Image (cartoon, rainbow, N blue to C red):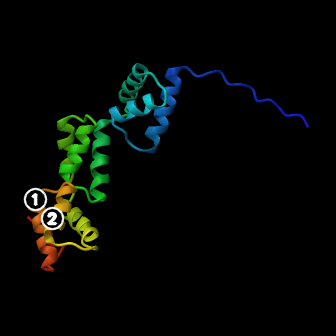
Amino acid sequence: MTTRKRPSRPEASPEQRARGIAERCLARREHSRRELIQKLVGRGIAPDVADATATQLAAQDWLSEERFAESRVRHRWEQGRGPIWVRAELEQHDIAPELIEQALAQELDWAAAARRALQRIAGGSGDEFSWRQKLYQRGFDAGLCRRVVTAYVHGEDQSLPLN
């Protein structure tokens, strides 16, 4: 039995390789510019080629820090993270402060996210202080933590606004 030899493909240039990796990453989910460059460099792409690729993709609207910030805020909200935690995460991605504010201004019910997080937290043991502390660690402000835990402990209607 003879094996058939595959025709070899020409070697891709570093720019083509970077573009292919970046497109596959962006096809899965939104990325920040910093995150995409880190992934490219981590896969052996030179930093200058990674930066040029990110610039090119941003110019073609494949890479958008605005879309990244909005999707990250919504994703973290769904996970039960608060706005303080999300802001810090976006700052670590070098997202511009005005884009962070814009993304956090989405119509999301942060009190509902805190209530969902509290239901998971309170399922185990603990007391009011530890529950407030855990909510605070998840990025909710102290006032909201206090109101959500108090409402939970006193069995108040959890659908009421907590302002």
Q: Along the line of sight, which residue is nearer the eye, 35 or 16?
A: 35
Q: Are marks 2 and 1 in contact (CB under 8 Å)?
A: yes
Q: Along the line of sight, which residue is nearer the eye, 56 or 6?
A: 6
Q: Dot 1 lies on which element?
A: helix
Q: Quadrant of residue 158?
A: bottom left
Q: Residues within 10 Å of mark 2 (few under 14, many from 20)?
A: many
- Whichever of labels 2 and 1 marks the residue nearer the N terminus, that label is 2
Q: Residue at x 46, y 33 (%)?
A: 22
Compute the Cα span from label 2 to label 1.
8 Å
Say if residue 69 shows up in the picture: yes
Q: Indicate the position of residue 123 as horizontal and vertical percent values.
A: 28, 74
- Residue corresponding to mark 2: 132
Q: Residue at x 8, y 64 (%)?
A: 163
Q: Residues within 10 Å of mark 1 (few under 14, many from 20)?
A: few
Q: Indicate the position of residue 107 as horizontal and vertical percent values.
A: 20, 55
Q: Indicate the position of residue 28 as horizontal and vertical percent values.
A: 45, 44
Q: Dot 2 lies on which element?
A: helix
Q: Quadrant of residue 29?
A: top left
Question: Which label was assigned to residue 28?
Answer: none
Left or right of residue 144: residue 4: right
Say if residue 162 shows up in the picture: no
Work out which quarter of the rendered image holds the N terminus and state it: top right
Residue type pointed to by label 2: Arg
Residue type pointed to by label 1: Ala
Left or right of residue 2: residue 122: left
- Residue corresponding to mark 1: 142
61 relative to 111, above or below: above
Q: Residue at x 53, y 26 (%)?
A: 17
Left or right of residue 68: residue 140: left
